[in-house]
Image (tube, rainbow, N blue to C red):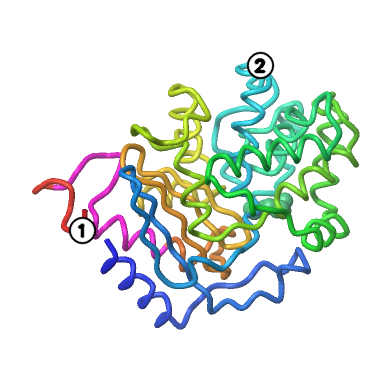
Amino acid sequence: MQELLTEIAEAAAANPDKGNVATYIPELAGIDPNQFGIAVALADGRVFTAGNADVPFSIQSVSKIFALALALGRVGDQLWYRVGREPSGLSFDSILLLEREDGIPRNPFINAGALVTTDTYLAGSTPREALGELLRFIRAACDDDSIHMNEKVAKSELATGHRNFSLAHYLASYGNLRASVDKVLGTYCHQCAIEMSCRQLALAGRFLVDAPRMPGLVSIERRRRINALMMTCGHYDGSGDFAFRVGMPGKSGVGGGILVISPSRASIAVWSPGLNKYGNSKLGTEAMEHFAHKTGWSVFGVPHGGEGAHV
Ligand code: GLU
């Protein structure tokens, strides 16, 4: 495994096309695209890393996994009256389907759906309390109390987040937000501004791995469902392509991070800030394709000869 990760990090460093860093959140625009990290937390407790695996980055939409787990913990299946479970086939911040579908977002991972999820775990609390609960969940998942939010990134997104404000107002006009638009956006932008390294994120993702000794933060059924949504909706309109190339559930963020779950084997985090045309990490996606090819890991079956050379 260590050999493979080193090989992947070297391939990333040698690749001249790093993709384009997101610029619509000004605080993220200045990030050096020449960074790449990967970490694998195996079900047996071992952790392997390569590259800049201990450099914290803005997890952005990867936070939507933890937010979904928290919202489901609050209201259970009631959530599905307010948000769907289908891929949107549109970009992460699209407003198009909201009008046609009466203010019910397609899934909890596009921005409109994530705003409903945030509104759900925010219900009955102040933003500070709700964000405290989210941080406690993530810290428990990775057993690391140092995880925090970057106030500058949150403020930067709040100051320029016109599309997210539009989405929230649109949801509110259909009665699909309980808290005020300002409260929901303030909470959402702070949630997205959580910083983690690949090592921390891989450890935090273990609650989605089906193996003994993994943090039991959600029920088995919920874990399977979150994985299913990651597979079908975790990469926006690039979700089909990621499933085709990697064959494992994953969730990306515009900060360049991707959390990938091999459901009974491992939690994997990869990060490189340059994005592809879908807004997902370019080198991160390529690295995961390389990883899946070499290990043979896929939810669609094992290759001939067993589990793959590197396992
Ligand atoms: N905070 C980002 C936004 O709402 C998250 C998008 C993403 O990571 O894909 O625009």
At label 1, which amino acid type do we have?
His
> Which residue was labeled with disc 2?
78
Residue 310, numbered label: 1
Give the residue drawn at x 16%, y 57%. Answer: 309
The reply, left or right, for residue 131 in relation to residue 182 is left
Q: Residues within 10 Å of mark 1 (few under 14, many from 20)?
A: few
Give the image quarter of residue 172: top right
Q: Nearer the viewer, residue 44 or 21?
A: 44
Q: Could you tell me how far apart the alpha carbons at marks 2 and 1 are, in whole angstroms?
A: 42 Å
Residue 117 is marked as: none
Residue 39's spot in the image, x, y percent?
A: 42, 59
Which residue is pictured at 74% across the width and 43% down the height?
95
Q: Earlier in the sequence, mark 2 or mark 1?
A: 2
Q: Helix, strand, or loop for circle 2?
A: helix
Taking the spot 85% from the left edge, 53% from the top edge, the residue there is 162
Callout 1: SS: loop
Task: Look at the image and give the residue range highlighted in magenta.
Answer: 286-303
Find out whether residue 9 is within the magenta segment: no
- What is the x, y in percent for residue 203? 47, 49
The quadrant in which the N terminus is found is: bottom left
Is residue 297 one of those drawn in magenta?
yes
